[in-house]
Amino acid sequence: MKQKHFLQFRDFSADEIGYLFARARVIKDRFKRYEKYHPLVDRTLVMIFEKASTRTRLSFEAGMQQLGGAAIYLATRDSQLGRGEPVEDAAQVISRMCDIVMIRTFEQEIVERFAAHSRVPVINGLTNEYHPCQILADIFTFIEHRGSIAGKTVAWIGDSNNVCNTWLQAAEVLGFNVHVSTPPGYEVEPERAGLFGTDHFEEFTDPIDACRGADLVTTDVWTSMGFEAENDERRKAFADWCVDTDMMRVARPDALFMHCLPAHRGEEVAAEVIDGPQSVVWDEAENRLHAQKALMEYLLLGRIEG
Ligand code: CP
Ligand code: NVA
């Protein structure tokens, strides 16, 4: 059977994503009751980081330990990957010594090449193009608060980055709509986003229009990791793309606010919004743990009954 990986959101069907949400619920409830659950005893996760992380590292490392396995952290700068060892060779070696791999890196092509030479499942822990684990947790969080996301409207305000692209893929897989508003020159690139079409998103010049009637308003940093050289230029271009109370006011009265974090108050989001009553950012961050435990369990053990 072909090895399964989670390199972009659309690698999984709606049915598989639905299964993961159901498992995340079970795993989270058990965790909250302090019930020991060790299905991954003797399994090892290797986590390769080429970029900084708080949530991704913590949720994968803690998650693997809580499932009874072990996690090893590899930073490129102190491994041979940082000295030019080919990704294909690293994949061959690393995947003979562990059971599952998570990679945070730059181009999507790097995780694709790693996966093509890996004997074990590979998870994308963020690339320049996608952040599938984030959106898994975000939609699980939406469902916890509001029920099914099918047919709902998500407003994305700001940069059409890795997190935005993944929302757009998820909209195609799960059947919801995304209203996107970016400054000119930062629009969605459907091919880079890995979309099948343009049916599930609509672009708006004015961010207020994108937020109108939305069930969820979400944003992310103006400058993603790896694009720091564009910081000054982006600060100017994105100045009017700060999610504030005026934007939240035109969304549905029960609209949620999400941000993958880390956030910059006063830049992409006003403090009153991220720290306000509609914000679910802490649940969203916590759910990285539960959703990724379900993901690792599925990739290593397949479907579990009960
Ligand atoms: N949201 C997210 O992936 O956070 P980290 O960069 O801290 O892992
Ligand atoms: N878009 C951001 C997400 C950080 C979790 C970045 O890539 O830096």
Image: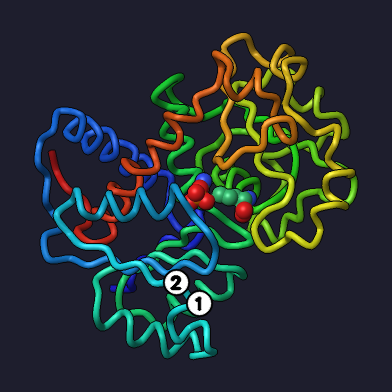
Instruction: Between residue 22 and residue 206, name the one nearer to us.
Output: 206
Picture coordinates of residue 194 (x, y %)?
A: 63, 58
For the point 81% across and 24% down, the residue is: 209
Disc number for residue 75 = 2
For the point 50% across and 39% down, the residue is: 174
For the point 17% across and 48% down, the residue is: 304
Q: Quick check: 91 left or right of 244?
A: left
Mark 2, ligand 1, within 8 Å: the answer is: no
Could you give the CA–CA distance between mark 1 and mark 2, rounded to whole angstroms?
5 Å
Instruction: Between residue 253 and residue 53, name the one nearer to us.
Output: 53
Question: Which residue is identified by label 1?
Answer: 77
For the point 69% across and 35% down, the residue is: 156
Height in image: 214 above or below 281? above
Which quadrant of the figure contains the N terminus? Answer: bottom left
Q: Is residue 91 visible?
A: yes
What colouring method underlies this structural image?
A: rainbow
Q: Mark 2 and mark 1 in contact (Cβ < 8 Å)?
A: yes
Name the element at disc 1.
Answer: helix
Outermost residue to the front: 78
Picture coordinates of residue 264 (x, y %)?
A: 66, 37
Give the amino acid type for the residue marked by disc 2 in the picture: Ala
